[in-house]
Image: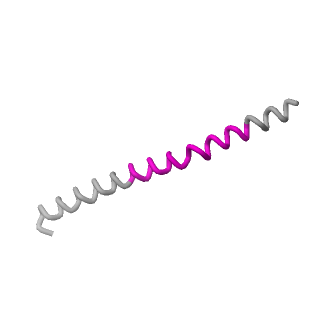
Amino acid sequence: MKTIFKTTILIAFMSAIIMYSKSIQTEVIESYNKGIAFLSSHTISKANLTGF
């Protein structure tokens, strides 16, 4: 009986992780893209200031 209970909890936990992982992935990707855009814009502006 304890094995069935543990298995049920494990399945529920894994299902929750799978359900929420998509939204977490989207949020991380958006944050990463914003950071890359910020760095690239600052790099380009500094390069223009030095006349490169």
Q: Which residue lies at the image location 80% right of the left edge and 32% below the top edge?
A: 5
Quadrant position of the N terminus in the picture? top right
Position above or below: 40 against 9: below
Position above or below: 23 against 45: above
The single residue placed furthest to the top in the displayed view is 2
What percent of the width, then of the height, locates residue 9? 73, 34
Q: Quadrant of residue 40?
A: bottom left
What percent of the width, then of the height, locates residue 2? 85, 30
Part of the protein shown in magenta = 10-32
What percent of the width, then of the height, locates residue 28? 44, 49
| Closer to the camera in the image, 49 or 32 | 32
What percent of the width, then of the height, locates residue 48? 14, 64
Q: Is residue 33 magenta?
A: no
**Colouring convention used in this rendered image of the protein:** one colour
Quadrant position of the C terminus in the picture? bottom left
Q: Which residue lies at the image location 63% right of the left edge and 40% below the top edge?
A: 16
Left or right of 12 in this view: 27: left
Chief SS of the magenta region: helix
Q: Which residue lies at the image location 85% right of the left edge and 34% below the top edge?
A: 3
The single residue placed furthest to the right in the displayed view is 1
Q: Which residue lies at the image location 43% right of the left edge and 53% below the top edge?
A: 29
Q: Quadrant of residue 41?
A: bottom left
| Closer to the camera in the image, 41 or 10 | 10
Left or right of 7 in this view: 42: left
